[in-house]
Amino acid sequence: MSHVFPRHCHSQLPTAVGGEGVWLIDADGKRYLDGSGGAAVSCLGHGDAEVTQAIKDQLDKLAFAHTGFLTSEPAEALADLLIAHAPGDLDRVYFVSGGSEATEAAIKLARQFWVEKGQPQRSRLIARRQSYHGNTIGALSAGGNEWRRQQFGPLLLDVSHIAPCYDYRDRQDDETPEEYGLRAADALRDEILRVGPETVMAFMAEPVVGATAGALPPAPGYFRRIREICDEFDILLILDEVMCGMGRTGTLFACEQDHVDPDILCIAKGLGAGYQPIGAMLCSAGIYDTIAGGSGFFQHGHTYIGHPVATAAGLAVVSAILDRGLLAQVQAKGEALQQKLEARFGQHPHVGDIRGRGLFRGIELVEDRATKAPFDPARGVAGKLKKAAFANGLICYPMAGTIDGRRGDHILLAPPFIISDEETDILIDRLAGAIETVL
Ligand code: PLP
């Protein structure tokens, strides 16, 4: 009997024993194509020799030094590299061990910034209903996934949740995508005015929504308008690129494509590519200088922040993404994947929308294409698809998000950036097999 506390108490999971490129191998020798990089983590694939060598080299030199006493070479080098490529005036990097820690730290930093600015009445966070920002209490409060929040309601912070930017479902027939983007963004303005601008500290959003929506990009101009609204009311903009960042959409940071500069940016997943648990929160010089010139101490911290081995892995991963020309490959392979998905599933009676950016693609499944009616939750479509795909040797990320009372069953694809044409075809064949079995 296993003593591991698994995600699902009654699941019997195969044991992973190896990984090669886009493939994971279990103890029986069965090979699974990692079509979602786990949960958009394994951007370089499995068994990358350069990254594992960098980790070994760092372990030979230094495994751990507590950041209360010492900094380390890989942490300094990775912070320099990230800031050299980061948007706007992001200037400082706060390393953590994962995505929830990054968003949690962002919420606390936003709050402390306003306290130190002499505006302690600013404590309200605004986020969006269609979002996931992590599972710790602050991060869970920010997210809009009702299924994840349900039983923890009494413990959560009072966060305002506005409508997402969801072209497929919410754009009206007589609106252009640009007009819709502006209208969707104005939901933020309405909420700020409703709660009182002087009480709001920050707005948090994923540039391309991952787990709760299946690679849902914003309408054109949406985030530019969001930035204007934040500036109008002096509100911090926190972008959560835990899933969509680190090259996943074809640029190192997803927000580059929306021409918007955040005040705080959260990354994780692809930053360590699964080789080490690592995340980071990047903040602007203005925020850092306020704390540095005030109390001089960010009232936060975990034992493993800036871990030398984790930052050495992150440094090797980001260097690989930049030096191997992977961003251009993600753009080209992402376009090809979109075309192949449209050719294969575009006319399927239960496929409502195929969308995304780069190698971050989502398929929204519907009961009825004409009305966009979602499936009855009792059918458990997403869960069945995950099982059928896995039996077929494909790891993909189907999710049933109960958002705004709608059941948005979707499949998220986020394969490693090194996926070949043949492997893309295998992915699509296996996915088609799973869809055929379930629908
Ligand atoms: N933010 C986003 C956008 C995510 O997709 C996730 C995880 O899926 C998180 C935060 C939380 O990250 P982690 O699971 O590493 O804590």
Image: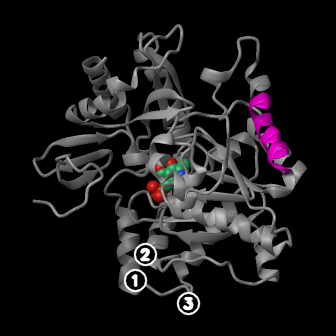
The residue under the point 51% across, 54% down is 134
Q: Residue lying furthest right in this view?
A: 232
User: Disc 1 versus disc 2: distance between alpha carbons?
Assistant: 6 Å
Mark 1 and mark 3 lie on one chain; the one further toward the N terminus is 1
Element at badge 2?
A: helix
**Circle 2 sits on which residue?**
309
What amino acid is at disc 2?
Val
Q: Is residue 114 above or below residue 164?
A: below
Question: Could you say where residue 237 lies in the image, as x and y percent from the top left?
Answer: 74, 53
Task: Using the rendered view, name the quadrant where residue 217 is placed.
Answer: top right
Q: Check contact, mark 1 vs mark 2: CB within 8 A.
A: yes
For numbered disc 3, what is the local secondary structure?
loop
Indicate the amino acid at tag 3.
Leu
Near-viewer residue (327 or 160): 160
Q: Are marks 3 and 2 in contact (CB under 8 Å)?
A: no
Image point (76%, 43%), residue name? 259
For ligand 1, tell me if the residue under mark 3 lies within 8 Å: no
* Circle nearer the N terminus (1, 2): 1
Which residue is pictured at 39% across the width and 58% down the height? Answer: 274
From the top left corner, tell me how far across and down residue 384 is, in percent. Answer: 28, 29
Specify whether 408 is left or right of 438.
right
The earlier-in-sequence mark between 3 and 2 is: 3
The location of residue 123, given as percent across then percent down, is 74, 61
Q: Which residue is mark 1?
A: 63
Where on the picture, by quarter, is residue 267?
bottom right
Point out the image quarter for the C terminus.
top left
Q: Which residue is mark 3?
A: 70
Quick one: label 2, few (<14), some, or many (20+) residues within 10 Å?
many
81 lies above or below 270: below
Q: Which residues are magenta?
A: 181-196
Distance from the alpha carbon under mark 1 to that under mark 3: 13 Å
**Mark 2 vs ligand 1: CB below 8 Å:** no
